[in-house]
Image (spheres, coloured by chain):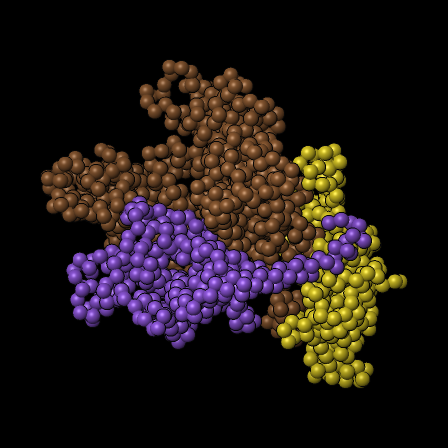
């Protein structure tokens, strides 16, 4: 800002390059620090290999759940370029509704029946949770987002924050503060023991179900007419509408798909963590968003892999770095910040940009 | 005449596409130079390289003998190279006068503390800045429009306001990116008049991209032609007009051959 | 009545039912008590009336018989152009035979709502009467709530003593509400007239035209209120007999808020100056006349005013959406706590010994700690600002949110430094010439009054600095950056410096606020610095009007002050506020008192056309001059590589 040419030139030669170099050096320093920490502290603790394997499996399970939620963020972002901040709450609603469905099933003794009955009942519970999430997701879109589609980007984000708070505290007022605890049926409460590695059934089920749901979504988007319309709207909304695509309908369907996945995640997380309460969607929502950003927001495979990577890091990170597990949220948020600083397009960002170019 | 701006072997590549390919160009002080070429020829990219929006892969850009390569946009405008944009980019919610005041931003010295305390020096500077801003608006023909929010200005006036904003930084070289685009004939005439007055009254060297050949031929002292990122011709408007490669670039090879045949007949 | 209007009425009734059931589920009837049912019916009537008014102003989907499939579905509040464009059958009905149609519409909607409400409450009552507990599932469905809903005593429910007459009564009440709404809407366009009057009134309040008598009357309001508040403070005087403390607080809030409108009403120049001085005197006398409780609330309000003004620099002026603003508030509070509380972490005392200061408490007084707290917060602002320099919009919001959470998690888990969840206790109070303010003023100023006074002074200072900066070249640079970052840089704005200045100045103000907050709270804990502080601060500037200091004060009064008055409904605070946030975004995204500059002027249709034209006109000359050689798409290569 100075008019002195000498000073300006001095500043100029550093300028942006210096900042870039600084961030690059910072990145290298952080990587080195992590490696040093892992080798001197984490590995020095001498945990057995089986410990690492079970942690990694835990991470994959968590990652599967994050992936389902992250897909909702990515789908909506891909089409509307807005962050559906209330998506974590959509998941929570699924979890709460799933809890009541489970209560209903347990009161009728379905959970103690022969295994086909239990499986069907569990599927029904998940379906009910998904349906509730879909209703909330679509209502959200209709009431809080649609009127703001032409507004500056800040406006829908604030509306989404409002919606997120509204949903959380409505659930608090309606269903109370105390957590609702899922009681696992006997069929899925045990686990599989392979040597020293213990795999809980719920974990395995969650992982497999997540993968199946993601494949279903992938099929819908890549192979159906609906998916083609969604991709067209994501590419260019006004052109798509000129080509006869009902943009509003596509947006509603996008919210439905994202919410259904989130609802499934909510129910499964309920079974896995055994409790749900009014704010239990918030932190997983943020994590899932992190995962979506990690994989490059708007990019569907990116969200899946980003979520799995985040789950793994969160599960292994604290032990590997030799820090208390309370810091796992710090690790996730730090990762988010670092990714956005060093690679704003996400780990798989190129895929998107090549497609768009 | 000495060259105020010297572009030497500048190359800019996007992915696999070479948008600007080893372009050499000298611009004399107090001259009016036009850069023409078909759409996509790399004209705006060259402007972007000169104003720091892009960093060229190779070559050198010297302004008053010193390199502009690697400087930030705000440092380049501080050196005295200001520009306007092909698709008007005003600060939409600001008034016309505020736009010009932002243009003067880097010429104002008062510290932020003095702004809080409203020292007499800072107040005097602000008054002078407003006065200068009004003068500039008057110069481009926008007097009386100072307090109009810039998105509410008619299209032609928005182009003029962009010029006034660029003038706020007291540049010695002004880059105009299609100043007459989308204007009606009378607006175009006044824009041409403005370009002349910029040079004659303010002593500013003007380098402009333009598609309107009437404008290019009547105001420029020299013309450079880009096609597919390469400079294919340079010279006075008459020289460029009769250059076979230029005709080919604009109208396609067959037409060029026909033109040559016609010329041969005559 | 045409069939499509009938289905419309039923749908309106269903929506009203959905909304009322929400109110019932969160326990509103139990809170209201006896008059719960009429209140709900009135709410329904209001909704029906609004719906009738809206539908009579715009073409409804049923009436035009087509779906709104365009994606730029405009919000309903843009009544003007729509009303003119197409006719609505309902509107025709309203205007031609302005008799039965709207009343029938209201009746039908009211019947739908009433029937459903009666059935649902009947089911609840029956279940409770038969000893089935609903409460473990739906927390607020307790006998008290249901009893209030059907207008009986809780005991009657327990004995299954709820008659069918009650059911009929409920249905009829809502049907009556619907008829009332219809009558109001149909009564010779009375509703529309009234709406027009309300619209005019709002224009007047925003300072357009008002006869001078009315203007002066309006301007007198805050002063009358202030006098009344002072009078209420005299011994032995009560307002309405009971609950004097809350009434006085409410009056204080209204007086301060209306004072801001008064400033807008007054003519710029000498008149405004005089009003400002008088208002200032009035407001600054408040800490002396209010009691401890009222002062503590007002102190909190003005601490949040400081926060809002600081965040406004980052969000409103520079356009950088920061959701982790609480981090700087926490830094300010904890810095002061470290320097003034008996608790001392080994790290801090080690550092102090290194600096040659004895780590005995209290280390630094409020005034000595002030620059330290501000500086620490500013450094924090710069440190957090550097990495996010390249980020824009939503990404910035999420990263800053992450930062805020990281800071809180560190406070919670770094027990050795921050004492973890146990917090830091016994933070010392700001002194006045080495004495407590109560001593110096002979008891005139309570300890909370002193905090309020400090908050007022600091807010005034912060507002002054922020406004002056905004009116300087720095403010213009911020605004330019907000409008178009690239062009701002190419016009000579040093982006790094300008952004970091915004972060640092915003953080400094938050640090000041945090320090005062720590002094007010005496004990601070990590939970005091959750994400909700950031959201509160953001919400108050949005509700008040982004970029406008007066709006920020109003926002803080509404969001931090009013809930204290409505202590009884505290549990509904966040829900109400969250719903308001969404509604506000839809209805009035510029805030209640927007700054003149940020308001997006709606240009005349002709001018809008001219401004919208460039894209079309731009290709024109090229095509004209250069013939077929110009492919339309080729321009993309140059523009956006």
Residue B184 in sight here: no
Residue B132 at x, y = what percent?
75, 43
Kindly identify the residue that appears in the image at 67 percent across and 49 percent down. C497
Q: Which chain is purple?
A: A
Q: Nearer the viewer, residue B124 or A214?
A: A214
Residue C288 at x, y = what percent?
49, 21
Quadrant assignment for the C terminus of chain C: bottom right
What is the drawing colour of chain B? yellow
Residue C587 at x, y = what percent?
43, 45
Q: Residue furthest right?
A: B1
Total residue callouts:
0
Kindly identify the residue that appears in the image at 77 percent across and 55 percent down. A10
Residue C544 at x, y = what percent?
49, 39
Kindly identify the residue that appears in the image at 17 percent across and 57 percent down. A107
* Residue C604 against residue A112 in the figure, above or below: above
Q: Nearer the viewer, residue C217 or C117?
A: C117
Q: Which chain is brown?
A: C
């Amino acid at each position: 800002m100075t008019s002195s040419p000498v000073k300006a030139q001095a500043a100029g030669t550093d300028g942006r390059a210096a900042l870039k170099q600084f961030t690059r050096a910072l990145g290298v320093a952080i990587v080195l620090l992590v490696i040093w920490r892992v080798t001197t502290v984490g590995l020095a603790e001498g945990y057995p290999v089986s410990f690492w394997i079970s942690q990694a499996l835990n991470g994959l399970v968590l990652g599967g759940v994050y992936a389902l939620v992250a897909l909702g963020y990515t789908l909506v972002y891909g089409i509307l370029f807005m962050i559906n901040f209330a998506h974590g709450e959509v998941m929570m609603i699924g979890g709460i509704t799933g809890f009541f469905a489970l209560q209903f099933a347990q009161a009728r003794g379905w959970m103690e029946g022969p295994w086909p009955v239990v499986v069907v009942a569990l599927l029904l519970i998940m379906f009910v949770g998904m349906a509730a999430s879909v209703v909330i997701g679509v209502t959200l879109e209709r009431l809080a987002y649609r009127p703001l589609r032409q507004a500056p980007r800040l406006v829908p984000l604030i509306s989404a924050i409002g919606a997120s708070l509204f949903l959380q505290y409505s659930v608090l007022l309606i269903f109370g503060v105390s957590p609702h605890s899922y009681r696992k049926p006997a069929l899925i409460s045990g686990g599989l023991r392979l040597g020293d590695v213990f795999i809980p059934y719920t974990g395995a089920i969650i992982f497999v179900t997540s993968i199946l749901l993601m494949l279903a979504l992938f099929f819908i988007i890549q192979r159906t007419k609906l998916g083609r319309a969604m991709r067209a709207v994501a590419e260019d909304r006004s052109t798509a509408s000129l080509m006869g695509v009902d943009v509003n309908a596509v947006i509603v369907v996008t919210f439905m798909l994202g919410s259904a996945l989130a609802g499934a995640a909510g129910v499964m997380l309920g079974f896995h963590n055994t409790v749900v309460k009014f704010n239990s969607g918030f932190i997983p929502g943020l994590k899932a968003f992190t995962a979506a950003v990690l994989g490059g927001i708007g990019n569907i495979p990116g969200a899946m892999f980003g979520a799995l990577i985040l789950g793994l890091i969160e599960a292994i990170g604290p032990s590997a770095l030799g820090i208390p597990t309370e810091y796992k949220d710090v690790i996730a948020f730090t990762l988010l910040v670092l990714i956005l600083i060093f690679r704003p397009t996400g780990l798989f960002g190129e895929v998107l940009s090549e497609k768009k170019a | 005449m000495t060259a105020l701006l010297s572009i030497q072997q500048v190359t800019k590549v996007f992915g696999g596409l070479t948008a600007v390919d080893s372009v050499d160009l000298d611009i004399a002080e107090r001259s009016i130079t036009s850069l023409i070429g078909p759409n996509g020829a790399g004209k705006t990219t060259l402007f972007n390289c000169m104003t720091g929006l892009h960093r060229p892969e190779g070559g050198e850009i010297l302004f008053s003998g010193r390199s502009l390569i690697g400087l930030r946009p705000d440092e380049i405008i501080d050196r005295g190279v200001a520009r306007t944009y092909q698709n008007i980019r005003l600060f939409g919610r600001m008034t016309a006068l505020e736009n010009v005041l932002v243009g003067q931003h880097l010429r104002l010295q008062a510290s932020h503390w003095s702004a809080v305390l409203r020292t007499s020096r800072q107040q005097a500077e602000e008054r002078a800045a407003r006065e200068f801003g009004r003068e500039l608006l008057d110069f481009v023909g926008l007097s009386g429009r100072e307090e109009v929010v810039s998105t509410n200005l008619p299209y032609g006036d928005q182009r003029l306001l962009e010029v006034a904003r660029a003038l706020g930084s007291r540049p010695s070289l002004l880059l105009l990116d299609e100043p007459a685009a989308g204007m009606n004939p009378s607006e175009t005439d006044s824009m041409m008049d403005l370009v002349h007055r910029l040079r004659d009254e303010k002593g500013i060297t003007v380098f402009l991209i333009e598609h309107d050949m009437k404008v290019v031929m009547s105001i420029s002292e020299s013309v450079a032609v880009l096609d597919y990122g390469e400079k294919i011709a340079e010279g006075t408007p008459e020289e460029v007009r009769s250059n076979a490669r230029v005709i080919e670039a604009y109208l396609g090879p067959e037409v060029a051959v026909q033109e040559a045949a016609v010329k041969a007949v005559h | 009545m045409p069939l499509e209007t009938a289905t419309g009425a039923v749908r309106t009734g269903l929506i009203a039912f959905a909304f009322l059931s929400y109110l019932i589920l969160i326990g509103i009837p139990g809170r209201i008590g006896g008059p719960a049912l009429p209140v709900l019916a009135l709410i329904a009537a209001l909704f029906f009336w609004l719906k009738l008014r809206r539908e009579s102003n715009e073409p409804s989907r049923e009436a035009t018989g087509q779906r709104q499939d365009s994606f730029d579905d405009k919000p309903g509040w843009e009544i003007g152009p729509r009303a003119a464009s197409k006719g609505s059958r309902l509107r025709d009905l309203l205007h031609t035979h302005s008799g039965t149609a709207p009343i029938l519409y209201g009746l039908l909607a009211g019947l739908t709502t009433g029937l459903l409400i009666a059935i649902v409450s009947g089911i609840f009552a029956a279940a409770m009467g038969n000893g089935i507990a609903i409460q473990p599932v739906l927390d607020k469905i307790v006998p008290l709530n249901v009893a209030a809903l059907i207008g009986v005593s809780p005991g009657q429910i327990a004995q299954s003593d709820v008659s069918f007459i009650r059911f009929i009564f409920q249905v009829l009440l809502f049907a009556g509400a619907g008829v009332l709404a219809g009558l109001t809407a149909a009564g010779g366009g009375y509703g529309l007239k009234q709406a027009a009057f309300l619209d005019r009134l709002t224009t007047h309040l925003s300072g357009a035209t008002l006869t001078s008598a009315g203007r002066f009357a309006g301007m007198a309001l805050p002063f009358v209120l202030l006098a009344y508040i002072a009078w209420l403070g005299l011994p032995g005087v009560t307002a309405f007999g009971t609950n004097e403390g809350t009434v006085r607080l409410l009056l204080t809030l209204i007086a301060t808020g209306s004072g801001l409108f008064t400033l807008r009403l007054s003519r710029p120049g000498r008149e405004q100056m005089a009003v400002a001085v008088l208002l200032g005197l009035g407001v600054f006398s408040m800490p002396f006349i209010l009691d401890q409780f009222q002062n503590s609330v007002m102190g909190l309000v003005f601490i949040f005013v400081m926060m809002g003004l600081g965040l406004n620099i980052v969000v409103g002026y520079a356009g950088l959406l920061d959701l982790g603003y609480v981090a700087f508030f926490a830094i300010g509070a904890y810095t002061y706590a470290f320097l003034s509380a008996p608790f001392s972490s080994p790290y801090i005392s080690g550092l102090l010994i290194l600096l040659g200061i004895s780590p005995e408490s209290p280390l630094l007084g409020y005034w000595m700690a002030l620059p330290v707290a501000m500086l620490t917060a500013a450094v924090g602002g710069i440190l957090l600002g550097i990495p996010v320099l390249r980020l824009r919009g939503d990404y910035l919001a999420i990263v800053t949110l992450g930062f805020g959470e990281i800071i809180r998690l560190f406070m919670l888990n770094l027990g050795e430094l921050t004492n973890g969840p146990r917090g830091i206790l016994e933070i010392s109070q700001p002194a006045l010439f080495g004495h407590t303010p109560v001593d110096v003023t002979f008891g005139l100023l309570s300890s909370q009054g002193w905090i309020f006074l400090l908050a007022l002074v600091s807010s005034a200072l912060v507002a002054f600095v922020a406004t002056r900066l905004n009116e300087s070249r720095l403010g213009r640079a911020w605004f330019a950056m907000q409008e178009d970052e690239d062009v701002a840089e190419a016009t000579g704005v040093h982006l790094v410096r300008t952004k970091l200045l915004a972060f640092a100045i915003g953080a400094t103000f938050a640090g000041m606020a945090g320090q005062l907050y720590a002094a007010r709270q005496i004990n601070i804990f990590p939970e005091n610095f959750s994400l909700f502080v950031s959201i509160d601060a953001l919400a108050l500037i949005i509700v008040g009007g982004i970029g406008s200091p007066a709006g920020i004060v109003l926002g803080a009064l509404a969001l931090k002050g009013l809930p204290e008055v409505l202590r009884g409904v505290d549990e509904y605070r966040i829900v109400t506020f969250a719903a308001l946030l969404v509604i506000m975004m839809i209805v009035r995204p510029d805030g209640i008192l927007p700054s003149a500059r940020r308001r997006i002027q709606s240009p005349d249709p002709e001018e809008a056309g001219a401004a919208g034209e460039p894209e079309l006109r731009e290709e024109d000359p090229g095509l004209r001059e250069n013939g077929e050689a110009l492919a339309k798409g080729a321009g993309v290569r140059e523009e956006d590589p």
